[in-house]
Amino acid sequence: MVRTGFIGTGNMGGALALAASRADEAYKIMLANRGIKKAEELNDRIENDSLKNPDTEVIVSDNNGIAAEADVIFLGVKPQMMEEMLKGISGALKERAAASDSPVLVTMAAGLSMNRIKELAGGDYPIIRIMPNTPASIGEGVILYAADSSLKPEMKEAFLKMLSKAGLLCSMPEKLIDAGSAVSGCGPAFVYMFIEALADGGVLCGLSRADAVKLAAQMVKGSADMVLETGKHPGELKDAVCSPGGTTIEGVRTLEECGMRGAVMDAVIAAYEKNSALK
């Protein structure tokens, strides 16, 4: 049984721990957080989850306990806290490295490269860098990942199985992680704004708020599924909705006049540049 530790059980760390607990294979999951209450709350949530693998064991631990035991360690702390956290567990990591038992470190910190994580950890440990997004909490996420060359194939396979219930896992060269994250990591916020704006328009036209939000959200979900399942270009699917002289093309004209495409592209570029500046 692979022993998996999560240091940091906030939104993303918690979502990935929940996904790991639902995997087809059983794991020992260890949870640690600077405030133990949050780890305890996540432990209770996982234990009471109807989709949890019944053979998976979940316990509340601490950073050094995870560093000393876990085969895979998810580093779910903010980038500015990473140096202090890794310094605190470096002794346990070095002891294991001396015994040829180095764990895999999985970092999700924006802007910190795999080499930088190794420097902060004080050793040449196998690293996986990931950038997940919040829909991973319901099994519909995107997890971008880049694996260090020293990662053993069996541990990579274990990692992929571990997060299989989180959503789509997409391998990507590390140099493109920041760009990918600007789309899939930041994108949910942009989409939520779009859904909210659609609902606002529906309310203005007379719909109830609840109906407007439900219609907008389901429409976005169905449209996204159409792109993924048909493999057609989004432009082709858009054209199929736009009848000559119809209402949809009139709405498309208005969006074009308001610069929707340019605004969305600028948002992605701004997010990418901010990611790059964090290095």
Image (cartoon, helix red, strand yellow):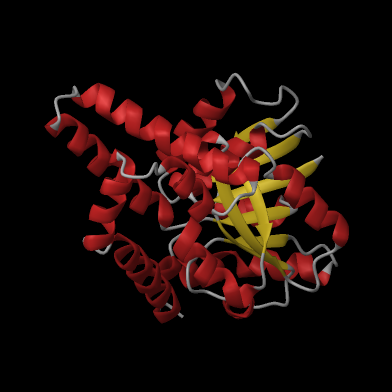
As drawn, 161 above or below 51: below
Which of the 4 quarters of the picture holds residue 166? Answer: top right
Residue toward you, 265 or 234: 234
Which residue is rendered at x = 84% and y = 66% of the image? 99
Relative depth, front residue between 17 and 167: 167
Residue 76 placement (x, y as % from top left): 51, 55
Residue 208 falls left or right of residue 156: left
Q: Is residue 202 above or below residue 114?
A: above
Residue 80 placement (x, y as % from top left): 40, 70
- For the question of whether residue 156 can be seen, the reply is yes
Q: Quadrant of residue 37?
A: top left
Lateral position of residue 104 relative to residue 228, left or right: right
Residue 45 position, x and y percent, is 50, 27
Q: Answer whether residue 9 is visible to the viewer in this image.
A: no
Residue at image position (33%, 70%) is 266
Residue drawn at (64%, 41%), measured in percent from left and top?
A: 229
Q: Residue at x 46, y 80 (%)?
A: 279
User: In front here: 153 or 47?
Assistant: 153
